[in-house]
Image (cartoon, helix red, strand yellow):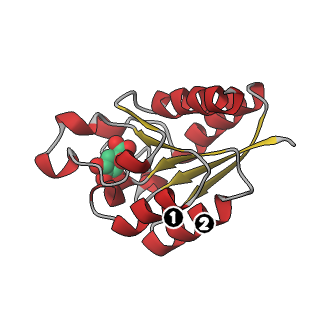
C-alpha cells in the first residue's frame, strides 16, 4: 500500500506570508505545501494538504484519517492551546499525529506555552519556521519504517 500523509493547517495559517511575518516567516501556505509535497514524495509518501479555520472540521479530518493515512502532520495553531475536542480526536485514532509549530511556542506568551494536543501526539516539532514541517515529514518517514 502506498504511504499516505495528511497535513492539516489550523486557523489563520491560510494567511501565512502576510500574517506576522516576523514570527511566522515570509513563506505562504502554498509555498510550504509545495516544499512538504516535494520532501514527502522523495520519502515515498502521497500527500494531501488541507487547511481549516474550524475546530469541528479538523476533528472530522482527523477521524477520517483513521485507517486511510500512514501519518498526520498537524499544526493546530491557536486550537493547540484550547481544544479538548482536537486532543480527544487525536487520542481516539490509531494513526500517529505529529504536531508542528512554526514558532517556538515554549518561548512565547504564557498562554501559548501549554499544548493540550501535544501529549497525545507521537511528538512535537516547534520553532524551526517552515522547516518544522520538513522535520515532521522526516519523523513520519521514520515512524513508517519502524
Ligand atoms: C502556531 C503557534 C500558535 O500559538 C498560534 O496560535 C498559531 C501558529 C505556530 O505554528 O507557531 O496560529 O501554531
Q: Is residue 45 above or below residue 94?
A: above
Query: Residue 94's x, y, as percent?
Result: 60, 53
Q: Secondary structure at mark 1?
A: loop
The residue at the point 16 percent across, 52 percent down is: 111
Task: Specify whether 80 is left or right of 55.
Answer: left
> Residue tagged by mark 1?
52
The residue at the point 49 percent across, 57 percent down is: 90
| Image quadrant where residue 113 sits | top left
Q: Is residue 56 above or below residue 77?
A: below
Task: Specify whether 68 is left or right of 81.
Answer: right
> Residue tagged by mark 2?
63
| Image quadrant where residue 145 sits | top right
- CA gap between label 2 and label 1 equals 15 Å
| Sequence order check, earlier mark of 2 and 1 | 1
Image depth: mark 2 or mark 1 in front: 2
Residue most toward the bottom?
56
Query: Residue 19's x, y, as percent?
Result: 35, 49
Amino acid at each position: 500500500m502506498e504511504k499516505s500523509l495528511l497535513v492539516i493547517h489550523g486557523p489563520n495559517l491560510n494567511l501565512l506570508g502576510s500574517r506576522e511575518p516576523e514570527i511566522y516567516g515570509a513563506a505562504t501556505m502554498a509555498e510550504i505545501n509545495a516544499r512538504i509535497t516535494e520532501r514527502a514524495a522523495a520519502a515515498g509518501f502521497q500527500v494531501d494538504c488541507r487547511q481549516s479555520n474550524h475546530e469541528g472540521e479538523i476533528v472530522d479530518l482527523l477521524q477520517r484519517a483513521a485507517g486511510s493515512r500512514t501519518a498526520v502532520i498537524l499544526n493546530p495553531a491557536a486550537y493547540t492551546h484550547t481544544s479538548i475536542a482536537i486532543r480527544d480526536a487525536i487520542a481516539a485514532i490509531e494513526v500517529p499525529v505529529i504536531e508542528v509549530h512554526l514558532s517556538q511556542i515554549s518561548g512565547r506568551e504564557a498562554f501559548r506555552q501549554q499544548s493540550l494536543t501535544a501529549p497525545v501526539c507521537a511528538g512535537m516539532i516547534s520553532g524551526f519556521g517552515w522547516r518544522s514541517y520538513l522535520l515532521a515529514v522526516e519523523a513520519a518517514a521514520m515512524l513508517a519504517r519502524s
